[in-house]
Image (tube, rainbow, N blue to C red):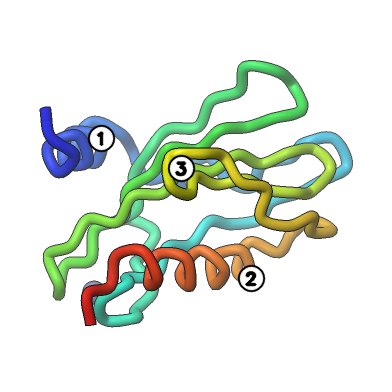
Amino acid sequence: MDLTEKLRTLWRTTPAISQNFPIKLGESHFEEFRITCNSCGCDIPDEHVHGRVSSVIPSVVSIEAVGLCQPCLLLIPLNIRLRSDGSAEFVQHGQWVKSFGVPTALLPRLGYQLVQFFRRTFCTR
Ligand SMILES: [Zn+2]
């Protein structure tokens, strides 16, 4: 299965990720989850961001998500870990990178960071 097919399958077989929010982790509170299209720059509507949320240990939540931008017909993957200290990690070049330590509830900002990351990584223009 190639990457595109994997993303399609994930999108088809999982519910809207917004159903899992807000996520409370210890003292940290993650209000929402946002993916912005790296082609047109639009926020992808909640109902078009699908994925799964899992927790292997109580202080960490893993999110595997994919957003569908309908105007661009683009699938945008996002793998991220949220930690109870309010920090987040995401995958960069196949490795988990701690992006920053945020004092909770700043996922819109986090979304922005990820947009920058995805633009650098995937935007061909
Ligand atoms: Zn788009």
Q: Nearer the viewer, mark 1 or mark 3?
A: 3
x and y, in percent, of residue 36 in the image: 39, 70
Pointer 1 or 3: first along the chain:
1
The three-letter code of the residue at mark 1 reads Leu
Q: CA distance from mark 1 to mark 3?
A: 12 Å
Mark 2 residue crowding within 10 angstroms, few (<14) / some (14–19) / many (20+):
few
Q: Is mark 1 within 8 Å of ligand 1?
A: no
The three-letter code of the residue at mark 3 reads Asn
Residue 105, placed above or below residue 28: below
The three-letter code of the residue at mark 2 reads Arg
Residue 81, placed above or below residue 73: above
Q: What residue does disc 3 label?
A: 79
Decide which of 85, 43 is in the foreground and name it: 85
Pointer 3 or 2: first along the chain:
3
Q: Is residue 93 left or right of residue 97?
A: left
Q: Residue at x 40, y 71 (%)?
A: 120
**Which quadrant does the C terminus fall into?**
bottom left
Q: Are marks 3 and 2 in contact (CB under 8 Å)?
A: no
Element at label 2 = helix
**Which quadrant does the N terminus fall into?**
top left
Residue 109: image tag: 2
Q: What residue does disc 1 label?
A: 10
Q: Is residue 5 left or right of residue 84?
A: left
Decide which of 88, 42 is in the foreground and name it: 88
Element at label 3 = strand
The image quadrant that residue 84 belongs to is top right
Decide which of 119, 66 is in the foreground and name it: 119
The image quadrant that residue 67 belongs to is bottom left
Pointer 1 or 2: first along the chain:
1
Residue 50: image tag: none
